[in-house]
Image (spheres, rainbow, N blue to C red):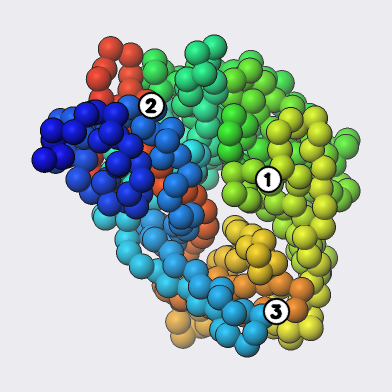
Amino acid sequence: MVFDLPGDLESEILVRVPFKSPVKFKTACKRWYTLFKDPKFVKKNQGKSAREVISLMRSRVYSLSINLHGIHNGVDPSVELRGKLTEDLKVSEMYHCDGLILCLTMGNIRLVVWNPCTGEIRWIKPGSCYEPHKSYDMYVLGYGTSNSSCRSYKILRFYFCHEEFDVLISEIKMYEFSSDSWKVLDVDTRNWNITSRGVSFRENAYWIAFDKETGFFLLDFDFTAERFGRLPIPYESHDPGDSPVLSVVKDERLSMLHQDITSFSVVMKVWVTNKIVDTKDLSWSTFFVVDLDEFKIPWVMNVMSFLLDEENKVAVCCDTSTECGDHTNRADMERTRIYIVGEDIYKQVYTETSKGLLSDWPLLVSYVPSLVPIQAKENETEGGRDGKPSS
């Protein structure tokens, strides 16, 4: 019987079987439930599973299947929305780090941290709410490392307010999972502002930021040192209306996509960094440049989110636009698209039009399913409960 096996042997067997098979049966007995929370077992399983993609569309989180096999040999790529992962929960923003997903509910009412692989969740109060049409929030999920090499998960929150013709950062707060509390960070933001959603991997988070004197730069935040820093981007721009987009490549590198929307440019440029070990050694190289005019696309694309496929040298992009109704049909229409772009290819693989104004931006996230537990509060044995986030 399996329950008669020595603990070390049992653990070694479970590590060797397909990753998601034992996850389904972690509640079969107390021994397995405890094993799946053992840091050593979690570390052994780290990176075993195949990379997956999830998407945020129409306020719902979906599992996404992308097939690019044979794309350069005349085979049409395909995208399929497989299943709704958040049941009835309406989500306005989604952030990923280390196999964990942070979701912000519509109306900035609640935050939920969720491990899609294990089903573990944890609800978090976002603190003070913003005033609609006067301010808004932006978040990012990350972790720092303590002296004992343990990961301490944290959430960074930017509070923005409208002041005349500018949008300014009025407050930056950080939430610590272990203490279940928020604290205000003393950061001077008078000379810069964030222009892109944040991405994170390892112990850092990154954004595109803008300084009126120096132009655009890469802003990074070290979750361990709790300190911001400035890094270069691969092009120079002083136009505050510019809109570059960041993406993470296999939790090793950053990628940036840029199209000069303000001048209605049809040239799209994509860069990637070297493998980031130390941000002091960060450098950029061109991934591809494509003139979209060659594909006779009738609109200027404003990419909201993208993922790189290095093997096929293409980017999977998504965007949303609003089409105004005519005098007989006043209802505005929201159109969401997913398309594949490369130096010699453009292919739209998904489009959906629905009534209503924009409520959220579409988002693509690539991640490796993980057994990483959601860090418990102090004096608490469980960091959450099992299941899917629901309203």
Q: Nearer the viewer, mark 2 or mark 1?
A: 2
Tell me if mark 1 has few (under 14), some (14-19) or many (20+) residues whose alpha carbon lies within 10 angstroms of its own: some
Q: Please name the residue that numbered disc 1 is placed on.
A: 253
Q: Which mark is residue 314?
A: none
Q: Please name the residue that numbered disc 3 is placed on.
A: 345
Is 251 displayed left or right of 117 in the figure?
Answer: right
Q: Is residue 301 visible?
A: no
Is 11 displayed left or right of 229 in the figure?
Answer: left
Q: Secondary structure at mark 2?
A: helix
The x and y percentages for residue 151 are 48, 24
Residues at badges 3 and 2 in contact (C-beta under 8 Å)?
no
Residue type for callout 2: Pro
In the image, what residue occupies the spot 79% across and 83% down? 294
Calculate the distance from the C-alpha at mark 2 to the C-alpha at mark 1: 26 Å
The x and y percentages for residue 331 are 44, 74
Calculate the distance from the C-alpha at mark 3 to the C-alpha at mark 1: 24 Å
The x and y percentages for residue 345 are 70, 79
